[in-house]
Amino acid sequence: MSLGPVVMPLSCTNPDCTLPEGGVCARVTEFRDPMAACADLARLDPIALPSTEPDDIDLLVQQMTAGQDDRDALGSTGEPSGQAAPWAGRHLGARASDRLLWCSPARVLAVLGPRNAGKTSYLASLFLQLANGQCQTLPYRFAGSRTLHGTHEILDKIRAWDLAGQETDTDDDKGTRVQEIVAHTPKHSGFIHFLHLCLRPRNRHDNRAIDVLLSDVAGEWFSDHTSQRDDDMHAFFARCDGFLVMADVALLQDKRTSRRHDAEIARMIRRALADRERAPERACSLALVFGKYDLIVRSVLPPAVEDRHTRDRWGVLGERCPKIWAALEAARQVMPVSVCPVTSFPQRPTRGQPVGVDRPLAFVLKHADARARWPVRVPPVPDRASSFEAMRRWPPVESTASTERKRA
Amino acid sequence: MSGLSVEKRLTLLGGPSSGKSTYLGALIDALEDDALSNLALSIDVPVDSRAWEHLTEPILEGQYPQRTQAGRRLDIDVPLQLSPRRPVDAPPVAFSLRVSDYDGEDVERLFRDRTRGWTDEWRARAHADGVLLFLRPPAIRQLPRPLASDIEMTEAERWRHLAGLSSSSSLPSSPPSGHNTRTGPETFFKPGLVADEIPAPPPARPDDPVRIPTVLALIELLQFIRHVRELAPGERSPRGRLRIAILLAAWDAADAGWQQRGAAAYIGESLPLLADFLWSNFHDADVYCFGVSATGGDLHDEHYRARFQERAEGATGYVTWTDSVGAIHTQRDLSIPLRWALFGDTALAAAIDTDE
């Protein structure tokens, strides 16, 4: 069975492949012509599948491009061998996420930011904190994930980076650290990929399971989106239940790059606001994340939580980001906003903990998962009520006479 | 003898070198010796001696079984009869126990390669009545530094520490592994009022290492099994329908502090992701943690090996668990986790009754 033609623009399921970006196929040593022979590239003319079709595109592609033994097992009908796992587990594609949104009240959270802002590192660090039971501010516990395979690949890279650092016993410079941690998220075409977390509230009386879809999108897509109209992106923003906007404090602190990065982040915030106004009935919130904060923490200590909305408390970040603060002020008019300093990997994992990783997610989930309680009506205290009667009706309420006077 | 004959199935899950084969071999050896309380082989049903010999022969030689060969699967049918303690005149319950041993690498392989490997055998294992989940503490614990004490730091304090405005010397020193200085009701009352729930890990200090979880493959496999049973993520199955017995193998080699605190405490602090997953997806009553030493000691130790082969006093396998009031029980009955997985807490109550 020959491989079908590749889908344009190119899309590859191998995270190490840079061919879609004009680079080199990750399996270049195996094929003379990757475009014709590489099975990882997405291709046209899918095989008709039986009812047990896989949940996401990754597995579909894998089944379509099975090895020779599997092709023989498939037979002339081209049907898969039936030994495929229930899901591929790298990302949730359009079909799987759509199915999840249909059958459960999943929360869609957009993780926005330009290239190298640290989105994937943040998600990896967040998962590690969850895995180590260190998400103290998050009122949820891990209940599962359909993307453990993808998470595992990222953690493998972190482990390799950690081991390499242990051998040399040095702390390398921060500039190359991010590239060493995780591979750059390739720009997939056509649809957004999600990382999936299923969470269960810690409250034993709350018997829900909450699916959280965290968008894992290449930074270039947001850059493209800010200059092009994209119906898919508009629809995605309108559907989101929360935004985590990642800003790189290293770029903001540097006078040569601060203006451009300030404008870039501010445009993202305003674009998310504009699309959100198309769906005002859905509760939404925004967390601005000052990522890589360990790079400036010695000069700008983060303010207290209650002061983080005040621009003056942020030192150089308040001075060099006028557009961001203006965009936040506009956002604050329509949704709750929080500003969070975060350092995902201040040093290698064996040397210390991240800081502030769980707070942005806790903030947006608090609003995405907000539920209105039935209003409690406290009966008024009658006139000449004894102190005991008044105490029974705590919290204090106005007496009946005073209430009637006010109505009059 | 008369009794109801049913088929009970158990699934063994565990990665490579997690102790599945050693446990099975020791268990079958004990069954053949009729050394287990209330549980015995049915005498009127023939057994597959070839499969049994494969597992028990190394044990009889005083050695650990070799790692199960890649791709090799061993399905074992064990005809058993369980004699209930109460009422005393109750007839024994006969049942056939089916377990399958396989190469632990299968779990890793299935995690990596999603296009094949999820065979009908695995789907059949998903419909088991109980799961024995094997973990090996010496293989899990990757980082030498122990977890921190229970002193909680605010986020502001952590930022100050990162900025170098507070030093590591000002932080309280870490206690030895397995010793938690956290105060709770057990400090003033008995050791642990309720041992149903796996305890949460203490908050980490800024200098503590971030541990990278090694149980993702097992969690994924449990998710596959739940998927076959049509359970959504976060949906708890009806009580008693599927029990998970966590067996920490080679418990005799675990740190003394952990042995004093129990297997559940180890799981809670060393494998919080797995603990959270089990809490979210199973009822408390359907998950239990056991510390298991199939051979009672290290067979690589010549002195102990000699005592093991001589069946010396105290040189046999044992199981430990923490009961509902926090007391740790130890019994030389390797079938206790198996009986709990099939019959629930009544098996533990019966085991405690026989405790000396």
Image (cartoon, coloured by chain):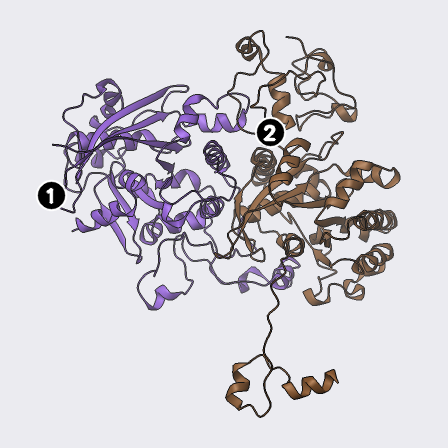
Answer few, some or many: residues within 10 Å of disc 2's Cα (few below 14, many 20 plus, some between 14 and 19): many
Tell me the SS state at disc 1.
Answer: loop
Q: Quadrant of the N terminus of chain A?
A: top right
Q: Position of residue B34 (x, y in %)?
A: 14, 33
Foreground pick, A388 / B328? A388
**In the rendered image, which residue does mark 1 sit on?**
B89
A275 vs B132, left or right, is right
Q: Position of residue A29 (x, y in %)?
A: 66, 15
- Which chain does tag 1 point to? B
Residue B115 vertical position relative to residue A113 in the rendered view, above or below = above
- Chain B hue? purple
Which chain gets the brown colouring?
A
A231 vs A176, left or right, is right
**In the rendered image, which residue does mark 2 sit on?**
A55
Q: Position of residue B54 (x, y in %)?
A: 26, 21
Amino acid residing under circle 1: Asp
Residue A177 seen by the camera: no
